[in-house]
Image (cartoon, grey):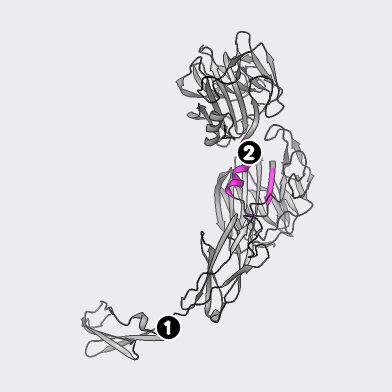
Amino acid sequence: MSDAENDASTVTFTYPNGAGGTASKSYPNVSSNTSAQLVGGIPAANIPSIGTYSWTVTASNGGDSSTATCYFKVDNTLPDPPSFVTADGLYPDDDNYHGSAGKTGLFTIAATGTLKSSVVKYVWGPATGPQRTVTTTAGAPVTVAYTPTQGANAMQVYAYTSAGAQSARGGPVLYVNGPSAPAGDWLLDGDGTDTGTGGHAVTASNVTWTANGRQIGQSVGHFNGSSSFLLSTSVPVHTNTSFSVSAWVRPTGSTCTHSVAAQDGVHDSGFYFGCSAGNFAFDVVSADNTAPTFTRALSTAAAPIGVWSNLVGVYDLGAGTISLYVNGVLQSTQSLSADLWDAAGPFTIGRDRYNDTNGWWTGDISDVHVWDRVVFPADIAALTASSWAGQYLLSNDLTRDAKGSNTLTWTGSPTTGVDDVNPPGSGGGAPAAVLNAANPDYATGVRSSVRTDGSFTVSAWVNPATLASRNMNAVSQNGTVQSNFGLGVSSSNRYDFLMQAADQTNANAVMVQSTATAVAGAWVNLIGTFDATTKVMTLYVNGVSQATVTFSGTPWNAAGPVMIGAGQWNGGLGFLWDGGIDSVGLFNGVLNATEIANLYQYNDPYNVSG
């Protein structure tokens, strides 16, 4: 309250009386520029449930006075719970399982009962998840999108009147099947065959195929940046509902631009999945015209040139968002101002379309997948999961590759010993190979097992007979003049994992070593990992990380054979092992912490049963 002459005033409140009429209460000597508050007043319970009421406040200094009037509306009558029913038939409320986890359904919410015309909004969502608000006029039906999870999805929906009255809870329980398989799978292993269940073959134009491009035994597609692409004969997904797309990519141009995968409209692609101005990107456009508005989810770092990366793009119609993942890690989530439009196709790999003009990918592409649903963390993790590349148990058959056909040929005459690995420290186990460096004893594979310019893991159980202050490799893989890596014991008599900086004479080695000195006559488990994205090398001894080091050179691929018990140095034989070797493993990708522990305990990173 303010008085022009700074006089004190009497403030009088006049308000509804529960018995009918009005009541008043005054506060004398209220100073100018201060406030007065009505305390008590009329109990809300005494006000009839429906009606519009007013109250006034009057300030008087004895000569002058001023009055203001305010209004409020009371409506305690509750609307009926609204209905929540399938609009597209995908998830009917019939107590049966339907659809797929991650596959978005459309639902109609509508007010019911005699008060439906007073409903102005609905609040809805899963009982255990975020609630969303959608407005309506006079309780009119509204269509919403919801992306369910697997199993029972208990939905809740409430109606609100203009007076703020909330209905009781409505909504069904939706029963949803597990995640569906991809709508399209293209390994790009020499052709455009859809290797999944979708049957959406793609036809190649000017694509060349590189053997052993990302993993040994599998080809990849190389795209020249000007005319290479693959085109589908049918459309795997609709882009006006939820979908996901993934691929392994290796950009090889001066910078990373254009799309690994897209789906054509008339003028534009419905989405752009690949790179934008040097960063990985998942883009969508507002409409299929010559001047669309972009929404873009970008990677937090520039796309590494010449390095394989796994990309995942997700459009969630229910959430109204797009998201980008790189190597399993969420990079960005962007909200959309409107639902996406449906690009009628075809689906393309290596080419996109913008403003009636084609754009071209430069680099390699492998393992493209597309889903007609939102993918979940388990789906994303599976795309970047490690896998066996070779296994040599070195027990009864010293030549056998238990995970493939990379058979060993032995030089010398290794003898048979007994390991101590089943389980570790038990004091006895299975047969193991014992090598004598003086013979020398070593084995050579038919070919390489892993791409050493990509991420890989190598492991072995070792028992050095002597510590002679020289480098000894239990496992290695040859290049032209040098082994790319060696796992064994260093010249400082410590367990080590080393990688040569280049495939050239007298190359420098980058080495990570154990914290303690190696022990002659004792079985230990060694695991070395190399992450090609971060270039970090890590050594584990008996499942415990010893140290990490960053590889200083440019990762290079050793295309020569795997060796057991030796390595290559300056084009000749070197790093001869003296002692026991058992259970050698090679893996595509970097084993995670759980897999490292399982490999040490059970000799299998993917089987914890022992």
In the image, what residue occupies the spot 52% across and 12% down? 466
Query: Badge 1 is on which residue?
Result: 49
Which amino acid type is marked by label 2? Trp
Tell me the CA gap for discs 2 and 1. Answer: 68 Å
Pick the residue in front: 318 or 288.
318
Direction from residue 119 to residue 206 in the image, left or right:
right
In the image, what residue occupies the spot 69% across and 42% down? 367
Is 120 inside the magenta-drawn segment?
A: no
Q: Which region shows up in magenta?
A: 367-386
The local crowd at label 2, few if under 14, some if 14 to 19, many if 20 or more residues have their Cα within 10 Å, is: many
Quadrant assignment, res 445: top right
Which amino acid type is marked by label 1? Ser
Pick the residue in front: 606 or 355.
606
Pick the residue in front: 107 or 419.
419
Please provide percent x and percent y for residue 477: 64, 23
Quadrant assignment, res 206: top right
| Foreground disc of the pair 2, 1 | 1
Local SS, label 1: loop
Please provide percent x and percent y for residue 148: 60, 58
Is 374 inside the magenta-drawn segment?
A: yes
Direction from residue 329 to residue 368 in the image, left or right:
right
Task: Give above or below for 608 relative to 203.
Answer: above
Pick the residue in front: 150 or 42.
150
Query: Badge 2 is on which residue?
Result: 308
Q: Mark yes or no: residue 277 visible.
A: no
Quadrant assignment, res 216: top right
Please provide percent x and percent y for residue 295: 60, 57
Direction from residue 507 to residue 12 in the image, left or right:
left
